[in-house]
Amino acid sequence: MGVPVVVCAMRGGPSDAAHRLAYDLADALLATWPVALPEPDWPREWRAKTVHTGACSRYDGRPGSSDARPGTRRW
């Protein structure tokens, strides 16, 4: 169908054959850590197709709640 495959990468890298195959076949690897902290043991092919997003949060850009008490969740 021509749909590119994107894999959400994990820190430390995959250690089993199924995950390594998925990383090899993916068109892009989505890394939720900064580019300044690369995975040193990743093959060059994986690093070349990795997109670093930095940390992701559903709260990015949202104002804080004024009535939130410490230790409580806001969702």
Image (cartoon, rainbow, N blue to C red):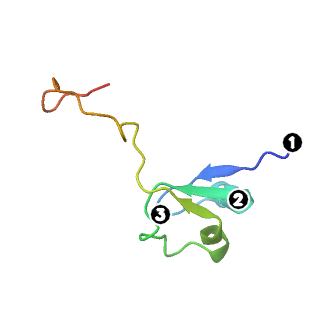
In the image, residue 35 lies at what x, y percent?
A: 47, 67
- Left or right, 47 with respect to 73, comes to right
Q: Which residue is mark 3?
A: 12
| Residue type beneath disc 2 | Leu
Single out the residue that lies furthest toward the right.
1
Residue in the image at 19% along x and 28% along y: 72
Of label 2 and label 1, which has the lower sequence position? 1
Q: Secondary structure at mark 1?
A: loop
- Left or right, 26 with respect to 71, comes to right
Could you tell me which quadrant the N terminus lies in?
top right
In the image, residue 19 lies at what x, y percent?
A: 63, 55
| Residue type beneath disc 3 | Gly
Question: Residue 46 falls in which quadrant of the image?
Answer: bottom right
Q: Which residue is mark 2?
A: 21
Residue in the image at 47% along x and 54% along y: 32
Could you tell me which quadrant the C terminus lies in?
top left
Of label 3 and label 2, which has the lower sequence position? 3
| Residue type beneath disc 1 | Met
In the image, residue 45 lies at what x, y percent?
A: 67, 72
Of label 3 and label 1, which has the lower sequence position? 1
Residue in the image at 47% along x and 63% along y: 12
Q: Secondary structure at mark 2?
A: helix
Q: Which residue is mark 1?
A: 1
Determine contact: label 3, label 1, CB under 8 Å. no
Between the C-alphas of marks 3 and 1, the distance is 31 Å
Residue 56 seen anywhere in this rendered image of the structure: yes
Determine contact: label 3, label 2, CB under 8 Å. no
- Left or right, 47 with respect to 71, comes to right
Mark 3 closeness class: few <14, some 14–19, many ≥20 residues within 10 Å: few
In the image, residue 47 lies at what x, y percent?
A: 60, 70
- Whether 54 is drawn above or below 67: the answer is below
